[in-house]
Image (cartoon, grey):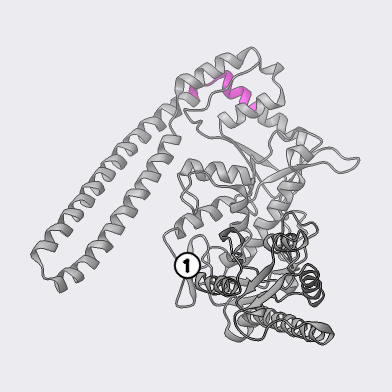
């Protein structure tokens, strides 16, 4: 890479020799590989030589042509063949003749060795940083944490990161986590309202969140296929976990335990294995059955020659870090029939249920009112805080104001956090709103058509009623009907 002044010096050298240098033929290129063949500007320069469109090439120094020794000799030979003069501003010029060719090859080999040693030293330096200094090669912040005094400490997104893992530990799918974070109003690390599944996967698989920093997870490799003009090892390969370098004691406030981390990874494996597109049967209660022994959810599975069953997510753990759940499996037909029966009784006789809804609605509306008043009170305090900052700036000396402003900013941050918490509470309360007319309408609509509903329509009904099945270790279960949200409606075909 050459500075403008260096390029001007090379141009001046050529002009002093009687050549004219068009601006479009000045190449200033950043290229760190000794393999010049993929370099677009070098390809253009070679073509100019072959087509005999130039009479000379100016270099600030001969090290501007440091590349593979054979490629270097071929290029210089082509220049001599096409009567292209090699003008060097600094240092000795390029040498002609057999002796000159040997010298040029020797210089090229020496430079190639020097570059490879420097690259190897840089790689070894990064590799040895964890073992010698106890620090990762790069101190990049992660969602919810930042580096302070060589430690990962909570930042402004720490509570949001805790919420992400609280949801993930429920054993639900990745897309359901995305939906719940959106409903809770928790933005991504870049401030977007909706999370990208790939971003969540990276966070939920990162061992930093249970207190360990993994280093040396990747190694550079040659790409299987080059998609552009690149050179060298431009691809990366994830090494086996046994080859990682682990650093402990750098995370001051881990969010989960190691056991919970492995539980999340195992859950994602099962989600992929038993996703609807890979299942041979529609499992009506998928994700609705909660194990009362370990807290995870059941999934549907059918072994060869056996009836479909629901199984606890941690029952058949292949991960050596986790204990297998003792909960028994449940025959799918039995539990699905029972859940349908209870939902049918509710829809055909909703009087008692609607009375409970009305009572809950009244309590919710009262809580909403109190929460809104609290938000308004905190917003007034926030405005008072801003006004006091402006007033104290006028009344106090610079030194006194600097001290007072620290207190003002601390109080303002606390007020802002309280407003955010109350707004989240309000969002949750609104989700619990019940439309009794919608429930009545749904019951009337389904009354004469329940016997003909498909499993997909039954699934819509169960989600509308927020049905939850509690599964016990003995293989027994209990069906709970939660409160449906006002925004959910059920339709039948």
Q: Residue 136, relative to residue 414: is it above or below?
A: below
Q: Is residue 342 magenta?
A: yes
Give the x, y percent position of residue 418: 32, 52
Does the rendering let one see residue 220?
yes
Q: Residue furthest front?
A: 18
Left or right, 311 with reference to 166: right
Q: Which residues are magenta?
A: 341-352
Residue lying at 76% horizontally and 58% vertically, measured from the top left: 51
Q: At numbered mark 1, what does the secondary structure look like: helix, strand or loop?
A: strand
Does the rendering let one see residue 312?
no
Give the x, y percent position of residue 371: 31, 42
Disc 1 target residue: 146
Residue lying at 65% horizontally and 68% vertically, measured from the top left: 31
The C terminus: image quadrant: top right
Q: Residue furthest top?
A: 448
Q: Residue 125, relative to residue 378: is it above or below?
A: below
Q: Quadrant of residue 40?
A: bottom right
Give the x, y percent position of residue 262: 67, 61
Q: Is residue 417 magenta?
A: no
């Amino acid at each position: 890479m050459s500075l403008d002044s260096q390029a001007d010096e090379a141009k001046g050298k050529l002009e002093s020799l009687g050549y004219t240098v068009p601006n479009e033929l000045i190449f200033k290129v950043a290229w760190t590989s000794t393999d010049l063949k993929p370099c677009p500007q070098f390809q253009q320069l070679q073509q100019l030589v072959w087509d005999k469109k130039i009479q000379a090439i100016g270099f600030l120094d001969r090290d501007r042509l440091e590349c593979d020794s054979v490629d270097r000799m071929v290029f210089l030979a082509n220049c001599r063949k096409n009567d292209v003069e090699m003008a060097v501003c600094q240092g000795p010029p390029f040498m002609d003749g057999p002796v000159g060719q040997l010298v040029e090859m020797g210089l090229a080999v020496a430079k190639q060795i020097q570059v490879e040693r420097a690259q190897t030293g840089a790689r070894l330096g990064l590799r040895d940083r964890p073992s010698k200094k106890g620090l990762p090669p790069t101190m990049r912040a992660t969602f919810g944490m930042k580096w302070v005094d060589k430690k990962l400490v909570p930042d402004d997104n720490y509570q949001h990161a805790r919420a992400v893992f609280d949801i993930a530990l429920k054993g639900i799918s990745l897309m359901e986590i995305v939906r719940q974070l959106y409903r809770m109003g928790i933005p991504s690390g870049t401030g977007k309202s909706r999370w990208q599944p790939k971003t969540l996967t990276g966070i939920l698989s990162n061992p930093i969140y249970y207190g360990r920093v993994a280093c040396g997870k990747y190694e550079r490799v040659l790409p299987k296929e080059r998609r552009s003009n690149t050179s060298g090892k431009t691809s990366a390969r994830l090494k086996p976990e046994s080859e990682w370098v682990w650093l402990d004691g750098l995370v001051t406030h881990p969010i989960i335990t190691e056991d919970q981390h492995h539980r999340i990874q195992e859950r994602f494996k099962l989600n992929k294995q038993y996703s609807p597109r890979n299942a041979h049967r529609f499992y009506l209660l998928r994700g609705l059955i909660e194990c009362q022994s370990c807290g995870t959810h059941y999934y549907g599975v059918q072994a060869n020659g056996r009836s479909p069953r629901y199984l606890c997510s941690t029952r058949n753990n292949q991960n050596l870090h986790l204990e297998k759940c003792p909960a028994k499996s449940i025959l799918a037909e039995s539990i699905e029939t029972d859940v349908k029966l209870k939902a049918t009784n509710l829809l055909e006789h909703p009087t008692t249920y609607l009375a409970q809804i009305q009572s809950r609605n009244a309590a919710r509306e009262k809580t909403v009112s109190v929460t809104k008043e609290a938000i308004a009170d905190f917003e007034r305090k926030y405005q008072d805080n801003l006004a006091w900052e402006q007033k104290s700036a006028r009344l106090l000396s610079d030194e006194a104001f600097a001290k007072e402003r620290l207190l003002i900013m601390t109080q303002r941050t606390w007020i802002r956090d309280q407003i955010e918490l109350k707004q989240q509470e309000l969002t949750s309360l609104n989700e619990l709103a019940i439309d009794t007319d919608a429930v009545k309408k749904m019951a009337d609509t389904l009354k004469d058509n329940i016997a003909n509903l498909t499993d997909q329509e039954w699934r819509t009904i169960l989600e509308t009623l927020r049905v939850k099945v509690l599964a016990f270790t003995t293989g027994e279960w209990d069906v709970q009907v939660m409160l449906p949200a006002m925004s959910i409606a059920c339709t039948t075909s």
